[in-house]
Image (spheres, coloured by chain):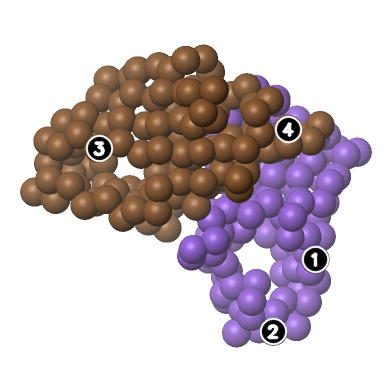
């Protein structure tokens, strides 16, 4: 099994729909992150969490919300999807401030 | 200076060539740096961590120059399988210490 698992892998949804992207990890790390990646813009941080009770906004949190259900689970929601949220979404985990990220395989989301 | 800036690329090189990527960063307090590799439509994967003056792993060498605030990645004897986008990653400012990703440099190794 992958260390960081994201579901779904691909999703097409309509404008205005609510959608949840899920992430779970088996690495036992406290820190979890949600990024989106767009061509030419690189990876941008949406939300991050350092433990179950600690949720923080990243640079592009508008239109998104998150839930840290457990140390191993961190979900991202789009309350009312819009076309410019079409992107590749990655969940990542990190052991601490000195370590690198481990990414999930990504969710390719298309909002039509 | 932007938080992290990479060579724009793309780099198109023949097999067996040596290629180097540079990356500059703005946070002089940064302690740990990383190079990630990302294949098309796949997740970024850690290639190398750079903690001190630099380190080597097979054909890959990462160098850190704190005085000039840049890191580099050198790939020797390029293989077709090295074709990918290489992301420079540095610590961001602030107490949270989140990582900042460069936009990446695309490498294409040709036969």
Callout 3 and callout 4 share a chain: yes
- The image quarter containing residue B56 is top left
| B111 lies left or right of A111 | left
Find residue A15 and name its label.
2
> What is the distance, in whole Å, between disc 1 and disc 3 at their CAs?
40 Å
Callout 4 and callout 1 share a chain: no
> What is the distance, in whole Å, between disc 3 and disc 4 at their CAs?
30 Å
Query: Dot 4: few (<14), some (14–19), or many (≥20) neighbours within 10 Å?
Result: some
Which residue position is annotated with label 4?
B97
> What is the distance, in whole Å, between disc 4 and disc 1 at their CAs?
21 Å
Which residue position is annotated with label 3?
B19
Find residue B3 and name its label.
none
| A63 lies left or right of B109 | right
Taking depth in this image into account, of A34 and A73 the one nearest to the observer is A34
Does A65 sit above or below residue A30? Answer: below
Frontmost of labels 4 and 2 is 4
> Quick one: which chain is brown?
B
Does B87 sit above or below residue A100? Answer: below
User: Image quadrant for the N terminus of chain B?
Assistant: top right
Is residue B11 at least partly visible in the picture? yes
> Quick one: which chain is purple?
A
First along the sequence among labels 1 and 2: 2
* Residue at far right of view: A53
Callout 2 and callout 3 share a chain: no
């Amino acid at each position: 099994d992958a260390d960081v698992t994201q579901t779904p892998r691909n999703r097409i949804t309509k404008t205005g729909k609510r959608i949840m992207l899920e992430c779970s990890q088996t690495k036992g790390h406290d820190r979890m992150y949600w990024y989106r990646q767009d061509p030419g813009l690189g990876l941008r941080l949406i939300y991050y969490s350092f433990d179950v009770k600690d949720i923080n906004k990243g640079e592009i949190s508008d239109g998104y919300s998150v839930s840290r259900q457990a140390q191993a689970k961190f979900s991202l929601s789009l309350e009312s999807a819009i076309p410019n949220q079409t992107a590749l979404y990655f969940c990542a985990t990190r052991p601490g401030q000195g370590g690198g990220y481990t990414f999930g395989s990504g969710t390719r989301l298309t909002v039509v | 200076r932007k938080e992290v800036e990479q060579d724009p690329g793309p780099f198109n090189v023949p097999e067996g060539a040596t290629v180097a990527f540079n990356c500059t960063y703005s946070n002089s307090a940064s302690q740990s740096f990383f190079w990630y590799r990302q294949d098309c439509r796949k997740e970024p994967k850690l290639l190398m961590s750079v903690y001190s003056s630099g380190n080597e792993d097979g054909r890959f060498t990462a160098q850190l120059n704190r005085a000039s605030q840049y890191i580099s990645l050198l790939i020797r004897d390029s293989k077709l399988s090295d074709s990918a986008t290489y992301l420079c990653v540095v610590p961001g400012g602030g107490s949270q210490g989140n990582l900042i990703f460069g936009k990446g440099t695309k490498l294409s190794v040709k036969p």
